[in-house]
Image (cartoon, grey):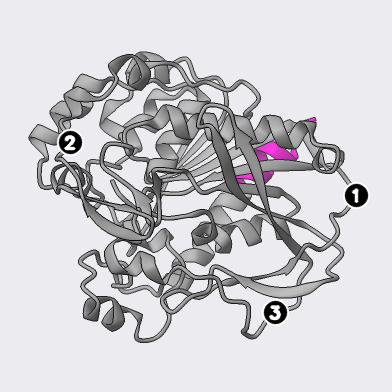
Amino acid sequence: MRSIISSAAMLLCTFTAHTAFAEQAVGTRDITIHSTARGKDLSVTVWYPSDGKGEKVNVGENRIFEGAPAIKDAAIQPDRQPLVLLSHGSGSRAIGMAWIATALAEAGFIVAAPDHPGTTSGDSTPADTPKIWERTDDISTIITSLTRDATWSKSIDANRIGVLGFSLGGSTAIELAGARANLGAYAQYCVDYATSMDCQWFSGGRGFKNDEQIKVPKLDLHTVDKARFEQSNHDDRIRTAVLVDPGLEVAFTQESLRTIDIPLTFINLGSVGKIPVSVLSDQLAKDVPDATYMQVDESDHFSFLPVCKNGAAELLKSIGEVDPICEPGGRRDRSDIHKELVRMIVDAFQTTLKAVN
């Protein structure tokens, strides 16, 4: 399923650094890491435990969303800490996960998140969306770079690496853990569920380049590179993964899921009976030998996006946004949902990474 900041809304994803700040010792730094596979640099945002000295910024704030406070370019605390990679949903970007990245850094993790080219805000097309192998390579490339870099390697425990993925990022994370997808199964899903959000994206004939909406051909999933789509993208350096509403849920083979030998935590957004089949993960959790399954009541797929500012829903409607980015998924406020998710996600990584020697 697409977790997106789409159409006109993605034009509002400008960074702002002027707001009220809570005192905390979370540092943040924007870096670039070269991707040989893509032939270009990846934009990566890093959060980490810091000395708390430096310029206060509010990562991810814009006209629609509230940001998360951090200290820009603060010094990294010297102790070696676990590393968590974040993979955003389709059409979103790294700073859209700043709220959970900050919470993880406060809990003692170093967190790194790329903007995935071809499936990020302002640069997203149906043809690029199924190329999970590009996203998994982004994450593996970042792990290699950070664990070898003279600065970051001093603070990263390379034996304690995890990944957190949301939506298409969840697909990325589970493939890194060892799952493999079947193209025929996914194509059939879009026949059976043609009105689902992700399948409508493939058939909509639109995309985004250079922050502008463009017309593109409708995507026939049978034209996707079958060998690449079904290849193994396993990275054995990853010791655990948390998957929130993972996309491509229907495509992963049971055989590959049963071979995953690291602990996985699946989280679905929504009350029982209201979670879309495209991301419903209870069966995945049953198929993975060491997996935990949880769900968050009175939420929906968009609840993982940042907290919306007052009036944001009306503003989005006025500029033609069709997705319910800022509409409540139930009776709960998004900030309350985030508190529950922070507990779930931080606890999962504390259990699976902090305890690893």
Determine whether label 1 and label 2 are within 8 Å by CB. no
Residue, disc 3: 22
Determine whether label 1 and label 3 are within 8 Å by CB. no
Task: Give the image location of residue 297, x and y in percent.
Answer: 35, 60
In the drawing, does residue 112 fall left or right of residue 249?
right
How far separated are the C-alphas under marks 1 and 3?
23 Å
Residue, disc 1: 78
* Viewer-nearest residue: 196 or 207: 207
The image quarter containing residue 298 is bottom left
Residue at position x 29%, y 56% in the image: 271
Task: Give the image location of residue 304, x and y in percent.
Answer: 42, 59
Please rate how many residues cluster around mark 3, counting C-alpha atoms within 10 Å: few if below 14, some from 14 to 19, many from 20: few
Magenta region, mostly helix, strand or loop? helix
Mark 1 or 2: the one toward you: 2
Please rate how many residues cluster around mark 1, counting C-alpha atoms within 10 Å: few if below 14, some from 14 to 19, many from 20: few
The residue type indicated by label 2 comes to Leu
The residue type indicated by label 1 comes to Pro
* Viewer-nearest residue: 204 or 107: 204
Residue at position x 17%, y 36% in the image: 219
* Viewer-nearest residue: 57 or 292: 57
- Residue 217 vertical position relative to residue 327 in the rendered view, above or below: above
